[in-house]
């Protein structure tokens, strides 16, 4: 089925709109062609990233939307047809072949790696003899990070280009005979705009830390209730007490090819570079995922895997970390824990315009270090945000234990477009009830939060 639908990727749509904003000739029409490319490598990094930067603005720069990050996923076999992620990216051009907008789009044969869970919708489709897969997914694969999904250049007619791309997405969904189109983790502004264009709205929840112009970690702690402040200090004291040393590495400090430290994995001591070491830690996390998934406090840093059975291997390959690290440079923040001359754990973060994004975590499976996960994933990220004067740390979804460590719930968004009107109505009714529950839970979490009265 994916191969048959792949033929539709040659589809080219042509749309017209009037540039009323162009004062020199307000009645002149503008022709925009929308095409689908089967790899992000078919567009230059400069052209793609120009759309990304215009869509976010420098102050809200989002590294996951860049050509470097998305191409790393494709080139290393993570987000490709063979793993159920067929790249089908949208490109909008003017008559002179200048790119006006892009959207990362994938034709999917499953629902893994999305972090907006629709498995029950698929079950409902199949129970009525309908097919839910394949479907279109407009997103950053394996990445529950909010940001614009329809990336439009900052022109006087950018709103029209946005509408052209949305129309093209809906037309492609209808003509491809797939069940649906899903735009996950869009910006709040996009979420509202897409409601008026026939999309259902869904709300989720993540945990973010906010920088209130803190000058130090201790200053942040002073905003917390005494019991929470005491607990965090006790957790942090456990790190040096276990002879652990924490380091935050960026850019050239992350050694991709040369020996940096010994690493102990499954009782074997070997020499490794940072990315190979981190990959082994990451594999420890994913290889133990079935045990972790059974825990009710499943954490953002636990990563599901994707293979032909969807449960046999991690989403991200060893080559991905090397490729991403090479392309992303100082946008990468790798937190590592050392015990003597051994690397024993690591946490991968990316740095945006005003945000640190916590992504993945892993550790030596042979030894348990109390509080190391909290230190590497949460407290080191907070310290880095204060040091770099960044406003937010995004620690991702799930894991209510984050609240007591200063990360409060915030809403996340997704938009869903269904071809079948019957299913659309039923799912829409479900989403209304679900949204009410999410709103209630966020309210309760805020009311019982870790901060002193008046601090939110």
Image (cartoon, rainbow, N blue to C red):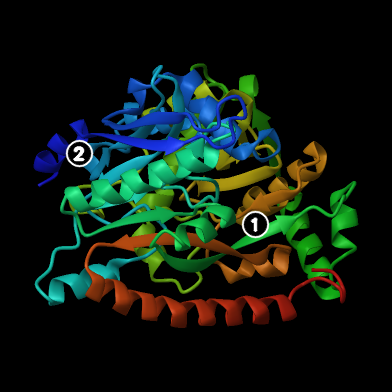
| Tag 2 residue | 82
For the residue pair 224 and 206, the one nearer the viewer reads as: 206
Identify the residue at image location x=64%, y=48%.
Answer: 376
| Tag 1 residue | 374
Where in the figure is residue 358, as x and y percent of width and height?
Answer: 59, 48
The answer to whether the residues at label 2 and label 1 have Cβ atoms under 8 Å apart is no
In this figure, what is the number of numbered marks?
2
Instruction: Rate crowding at label 1 as few (under 14), some (14 to 19) or many (20 or more) other CA atoms within 10 Å.
Output: some
Q: Nearer the viewer, mark 2 or mark 1?
A: 2
Separation of disc 2 and disc 1 at Cα?
A: 35 Å
The C terminus, quarter of image: bottom right
Q: Judge whether residue 63 can be spotted in this image.
A: yes
Where in the figure is residue 144, as x and y percent of width and height?
Answer: 49, 52
For the residue pair 126 and 253, the one nearer the viewer reads as: 126
Instruction: Rate crowding at label 2 as few (under 14), some (14 to 19) or many (20 or more) other CA atoms within 10 Å.
Output: few
Label 1's element? helix
Identify the residue at image location x=34%, y=37%.
Answer: 15
Q: Judge whether residue 448 can be spotted in this image.
A: no
Identify the residue at image location x=18%, y=71%.
Answer: 125
Relative to 243, 254 lies left or right: left
Where in the figure is residue 67, as x and y percent of width and height?
Answer: 46, 27
Quadrant location of residue 178? bottom left
Comes first in the chain, label 2 or label 1? 2
Q: Is residue 258 above or below residue 423?
A: above
Where in the figure is residue 134, as x and y percent of width and height?
Answer: 19, 53
Relative to 323, 180 lies left or right: left
Relative to 99, 119 lies left or right: left
Q: Is residue 259 above or below residue 161?
A: above
Identify the residue at image location x=84%, y=51%.
Answer: 217
Q: Is residue 342 above or below residue 94?
A: below
Label 2's element? helix
């Amino acid at each position: 089925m994916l191969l048959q639908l792949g033929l539709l990727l040659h589809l080219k749509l042509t749309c017209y709109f009037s540039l009323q904003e162009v004062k020199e000739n307000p009645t002149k029409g503008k022709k925009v062609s929308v095409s689908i490319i089967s790899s992000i490598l078919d567009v230059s990094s400069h052209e793609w990233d120009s759309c990304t930067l215009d869509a976010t603005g420098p102050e809200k720069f989002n590294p996951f939307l860049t050509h470097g990050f998305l191409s790393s996923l494709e080139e290393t076999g993570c987000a490709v047809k063979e793993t159920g992620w067929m790249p089908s990216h949208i490109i909008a051009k003017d008559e002179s072949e200048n790119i006006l907008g892009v959207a990362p789009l994938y034709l999917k044969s499953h629902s893994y790696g999305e972090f907006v869970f629709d498995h029950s919708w698929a079950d409902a489709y199949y129970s009525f003899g309908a097919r839910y897969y394949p479907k279109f997914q407009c997103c950053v694969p394996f990445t529950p990070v909010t940001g614009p999904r329809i990336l439009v250049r900052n022109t006087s007619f950018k709103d029209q280009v946005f509408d052209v791309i949305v129309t093209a997405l809906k037309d492609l969904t209808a003509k491809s005979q797939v069940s649906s189109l899903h735009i996950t983790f869009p910006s709040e502004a996009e979420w509202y705009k897409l409601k008026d264009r026939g999309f259902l709205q869904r709300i989720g929840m993540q945990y973010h830390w906010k920088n209130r112009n803190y000058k130090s970690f201790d200053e942040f702690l002073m905003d917390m209730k005494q019991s929470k402040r005491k607990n965090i200090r006790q957790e942090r004291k456990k790190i040096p007490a276990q002879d652990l040393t924490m380091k935050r590495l960026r850019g050239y400090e992350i050694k991709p090819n040369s020996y940096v430290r010994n690493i102990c994995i499954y009782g074997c001591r070997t020499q490794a570079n940072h990315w190979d070491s981190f990959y082994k830690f990451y594999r420890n996390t994913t290889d133990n995922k079935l045990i972790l998934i059974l825990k009710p406090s499943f954490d953002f840093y636990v990563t599901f895997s994707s293979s032909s059975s969807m449960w046999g291997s991690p989403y991200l390959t060893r080559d991905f970390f090397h490729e991403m690290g090479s392309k992303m440079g100082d946008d990468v923040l790798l937190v590592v824990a050392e015990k003597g001359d051994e690397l024993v754990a690591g946490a991968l973060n990316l740095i945006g315009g005003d945000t640190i994004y916590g992504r993945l975590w892993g550790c030596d499976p042979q030894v348990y270090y109390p509080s190391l996960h909290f230190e590497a994933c949460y407290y080191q990220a907070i310290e880095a945000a204060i040091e770099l004067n960044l406003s937010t740390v995004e620690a991702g979804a799930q894991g209510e234990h984050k609240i007591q460590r200063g990360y409060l719930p915030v809403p996340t968004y997704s938009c869903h477009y269904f071809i079948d009107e019957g299913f659309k109505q039923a799912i829409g009714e479900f989403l209304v009830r679900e949204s009410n529950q999410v709103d209630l839970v966020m309210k309760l979490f805020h009311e019982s939060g870790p901060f002193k009265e008046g601090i939110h």
